[in-house]
């Protein structure tokens, strides 16, 4: 079965540095096959015998802590889950600005009351939608100037997340084949 691992917060600034060659080596030593990485921000595609993504997350997280000495959140999705993320895009017009359109991969589905508590009109022209364990966010004025991005963080959602822009999400899907 094919999986995608998304590591949070590595190779941003001077802390938590992992060369992608070392990440590929680590995943291979864990027994995973066909390991490929995309960009320098901790995106890996690999094959493994059928396992729950949560078990893979824990195993990869522990291996990174053991090898590199720091804690990293890891989100794992199956290839079919990633394909669904692309197919189920609830804001299709946002793909016209793929660098301003993010998908945040969440550790769990956020509470419905949390999402209902965010007034989307207050953040226009930005848009967001939550579908299962993914948050889609279109930052029309850019990510750095996004007021909504600041609200839809781990603390605001009550779950751990790691975000990728639409370009990266679709490139990962292409890497899966």
Image: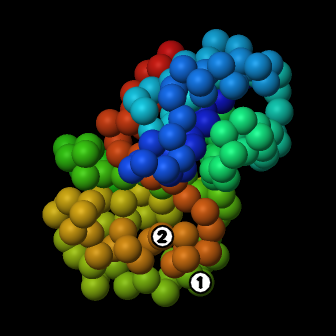
The label number, if any, that marks residue 154 in the structure image: none
The label number, if any, that marks residue 113 in the structure image: 1
- Assign a secondary structure to mark 1: helix
Residue 78 can be seen in this image: yes
Sooner in the amino-acid sequence: mark 1 or mark 2: 1
Q: Please give left or right for residue 108 compared with residue 96 in the image.
A: right
Image quadrant of residue 169? top left
Residue 173 can be seen in this image: no
x%, y% of residue 57? 73, 43
Up the image or down, 89 lies above or below 77; here it is below
Which is more toward the observer, 68 or 163? 68
Q: Please give left or right for residue 18 compared with residue 89 in the image.
A: right
x%, y% of residue 75? 63, 46
Q: Kindly identify which residue carries mark 2.
A: 153
Which is more toward the observer, 34 or 30? 30
Q: Residue at x 30, y 51 (%)?
A: 101
- Assign a secondary structure to mark 2: loop
Nearest to viewer (mark 1 / mark 2): 2
């Amino acid at each position: 079965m094919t999986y995608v691992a998304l590591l949070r917060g590595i190779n941003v600034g001077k802390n938590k540095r992992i060369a992608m060659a070392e990440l590929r080596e680590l995943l291979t030593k864990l027994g995973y096959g066909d390991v490929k990485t995309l960009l320098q921000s901790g995106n890996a595609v690999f094959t493994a015998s059928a396992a729950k993504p949560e078990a893979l997350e824990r195993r990869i997280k522990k291996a990174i802590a053991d090898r590199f000495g720091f804690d990293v959140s890891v989100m794992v999705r199956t290839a079919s889950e990633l394909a669904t993320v692309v197919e189920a895009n609830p804001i299709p017009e946002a793909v016209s600005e793929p660098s301003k359109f993010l998908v945040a991969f969440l550790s769990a589905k956020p509470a419905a009351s949390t999402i209902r508590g965010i007034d989307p009109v207050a953040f226009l022209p930005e848009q967001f939608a939550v579908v299962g364990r993914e948050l889609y966010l279109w930052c029309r004025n850019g990510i750095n100037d996004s007021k909504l991005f600041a609200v839809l963080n781990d603390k605001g959602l009550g779950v751990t997340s790691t975000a990728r822009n639409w370009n990266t999400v679709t490139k990962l899907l292409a890497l899966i084949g």
